[in-house]
Image (cartoon, helix red, strand yellow):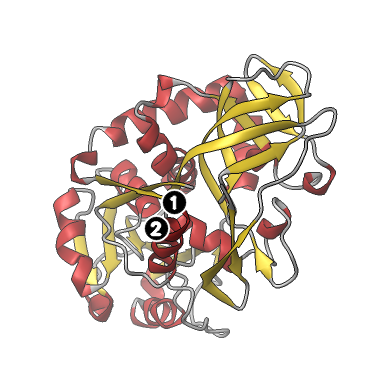
Amino acid sequence: MTTLAAHIGDLGQTTALPDPGAIADGEARFVVEHFALTANNVTYAVHGEDFAYWRFFPAPEGHGIVPVWGFARVTESKADGISVGDRFFGYWPMAAQAVLTPVAVSAHGFTDGVAHRAGLPPFYNRYNPASPDWGDEALQCLFRPLYATSFLIDCMVATRPVDTLVLSSASSKTALGVAQAAKGRQRVVGLTSAANRDFCLATGCYDQVLSYDEIAQVEGGAIAFVDMAGHGGVRRDVHTLLGDRLKESHVVGDTHWQAPNVAELPGPAPQLFFAPTVAQGRVAEWGPAGFEQRLGAAWVSFAATLSWLRVERVTGDAAVAQAWAALVAGRIDPAAGIIASL
């Protein structure tokens, strides 16, 4: 059993770290049973410093432990209300084991109360009991946090006075969730690489799919751009080629993180979309139960469209490290959903 830490200067490279030692009073040890590896995890690593993702699971100097979403089981507990055998869904290190400090324990889960996570977004610090409500556990690992982001993006763009949404990195799971929710309400155009164009079309989520060299062909009189790619050149082309028709620009992810961003852009200033902040606003507006009801209904609708998904499982240090390196390099088939175990 081990923990994989990414090299901050070369994210595709990893180092194996030893598992945590003995637990103290108030702590519990979890075996991380399985977790997803998606482009979302690459975004966590790219923004490990500026968005404080490296703070969740501290690592030695020059390294960062990538947070992942998945399921874990309690194997040892000195925390009140947490029993051996309990299983939880949440935000874990890319590791075989994790030690947390459960507080605010209830039938609905717990919060990790360890000091170094104080002040970090509550969305990431909360752990929920394993439940079949979201369906198959592989789908939950792959989509549960991503679809929450898709849902929140859709909630935002649904209120905008635009007739067309343009989504970059259209093959990403988050973009597909937005597209499926918005289609029929607004025209949805996906931008992707030529290699992924047929895949995006086959999902049925888009009204139109264009390659990155076809941006000038985007139709629509009032357009919102939702940038999942984080590619400076793509963002520049969208802002330049769509001209006055581009009314809004939102930055969500960094699937093309290696490409430099462009500081000066024509048209609307890009606005950073940070899901935890938006989620807190929606919960305040709808209440926790109202938020969960709306999110659950939207998820059921999206889950019914996932016939294109192929779950692929990787197990062990070497295989997981290799899958992570391929993901960082952008070499993952968009139809594949990677479920990993260390």
In terms of image quadrants, where is residue 129? top right
In the rendered image, residue 326, in percent from the top left (x then y), is placed at: 38, 67
Q: Is residue 227 visible?
A: no
Q: Which of 153 and 116 lies nearest the eye of the viewer? A: 116
Q: Which residue is mark 2?
A: 319
- Identify the residue shown where x is 66% and y is 54%: 18
Instruction: Look at 72% across and 36% down and name the residue there.
Output: 100
Q: Secondary structure at mark 2?
A: helix
Q: Residue at x 74, y 65 (%)?
A: 60
Q: Does residue 60 appear in the picture of this structure?
A: yes
Closest to the observer, 78 or 299: 78
The type of residue carrying mark 1 is Gly
Figure check: 192 above or below 76: below
Q: Would residue 229 appear left or right of 80 to someone viewing this image?
A: left
Q: Which mark is residue 291?
A: none
Quarter occupied by residue 224: bottom left
- The disc labelled 2 sits on which kind of residue? Ala
